[in-house]
Image: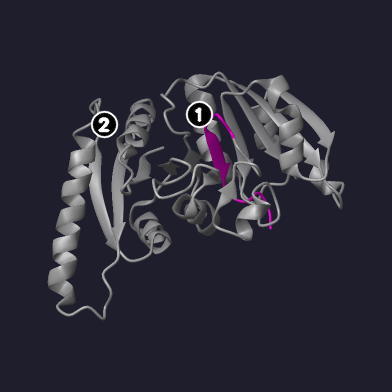
Amino acid sequence: MKSILVPIGTNPESHATLQYAVDFASEFSSTIYVMEVFSVSSKTGGLSNISEKVSKSSKEHMREVIDKIDPKNVDIKIATYNGDIVDGLKDIDKELGIDLIIISPRSNDIKEELYLGYTSGKIVKRTDIPTLIVPKGTPFAPFGSVLTAFKSGVLKRKRILDPLVAIQNRFKPIVNLLLVKTPGYSDEDLKVNPALMDISSHLTITENPTTYLGVTEHFRSHHPDLLCVFRRKRGFFKKLWESNTILKSEFYAPIPVLILPEMKK
C-alpha cells in the first residue's frame, strides 16, 4: 500500500483518525494524502480569487490537524479540492493511484444514532476505492484476527484483495472466511477463489437471508479485530444504496471495517 488518503472535515477530532492512519501507514512505509474538500460556486463573483482564499484556509486547517499528531516519519502531503468529495476522490485516485481510504464512520454534524454519516456514506457508496472505516477513539493495533464475509466466492479480479493480502502479509493474522448462502445463490457462488483460500485459516459456510445477518450470527464466535466485507449494491451495505446514511440499529461495528471493491457484477 503505497498511497493512503485521509479525508479531513470539520470534526474537531479528525486528528484522531489521521493519527490512526499514520500509525497504520508507518507499518507499510506508505505516503499519506490529507484531503479537504470545499465548494465555491461558479456563480460566485471573482471565483478564482475566492477559490484561492478558501483553498489556502483549507490547507491551514489541515496543517493545524497535522500539528496535533505524531507523524512518525511518515510522508504526509496535503491536497484540496473544489467540488464534490466523490469527484475529488476519483480525480486524486486517477492522478496518484490511491490504495486505501481511511475514514471515521461519521462527521461531527451527524446524530449519534448513525453509524455512517452522509459524507462517509457517500465515500463508501460512490467510490470503488478500498476503504477502512475506523470507529471513533480506536487506537491502531496490529490485527490478530480478521473475519472476511461474502455471499459469493467469485472474484472479478485478484487485485481486489490487495489491501487484505497486504494486511495478512504484514501482521500474519488469522483470516477466517464466512461464506453466507443467501436466497437465490448459485453453485458458482460456493466455489471460493483460490486467492481467498490461500490467505485464510478457516472457511465457514452459513445460510442466512442476508450477508449482514450471517455476520451478526458469527461475529461474536470469531472475535475479530477487523471485519472485511465487499461492496455490492444488493449486498452487505444494501441499505446504503437507499440512503447515504446507515443507522446503528441497522449496522454497527465496534472494530475497524475494511470494505473492498465488488467481487463480481
Q: Residues within 10 Å of mark 1 (few under 14, many from 20)?
A: some
Closer to the chain start, of discs 2 and 1, is 2
Camera-side residue of 244 and 203:
244
Which residue corresponds to mark 2?
74
Q: Specify start and end residues of the magenta stretch as a single range.
A: 253-265
Give amino acid for label 1: Ile
Q: Is residue 209 left or right of residue 42?
A: right
Instruction: Tell me which residue sits at (69%, 27%) in the image.
Output: 219
Camera-side residue of 181 and 199:
181
For the C terminus, give its image quadrant: bottom right
- The alpha-carbon separation of the residues under discs 2 and 1 comes to 18 Å
Please say whether residue 247 is one of the residues in the magenta stretch.
no
Q: Position of residue 45 (x, y in %)?
A: 17, 80
Q: Position of residue 210 (x, y in %)?
A: 77, 45
Please say whether residue 260 is one of the residues in the magenta stretch.
yes
Assign a secondary structure to mark 1. helix
Q: Position of residue 27 (x, y in %)?
A: 38, 25
Q: Is residue 160 left or right of residue 142?
A: right
Give amino acid for label 2: Val
Instruction: Tell me which residue sits at (49%, 39%) in the image.
Output: 133
Note whether 30 is above or below 38 in the view shown. above
Q: Is residue 241 left or right of residue 177?
A: left
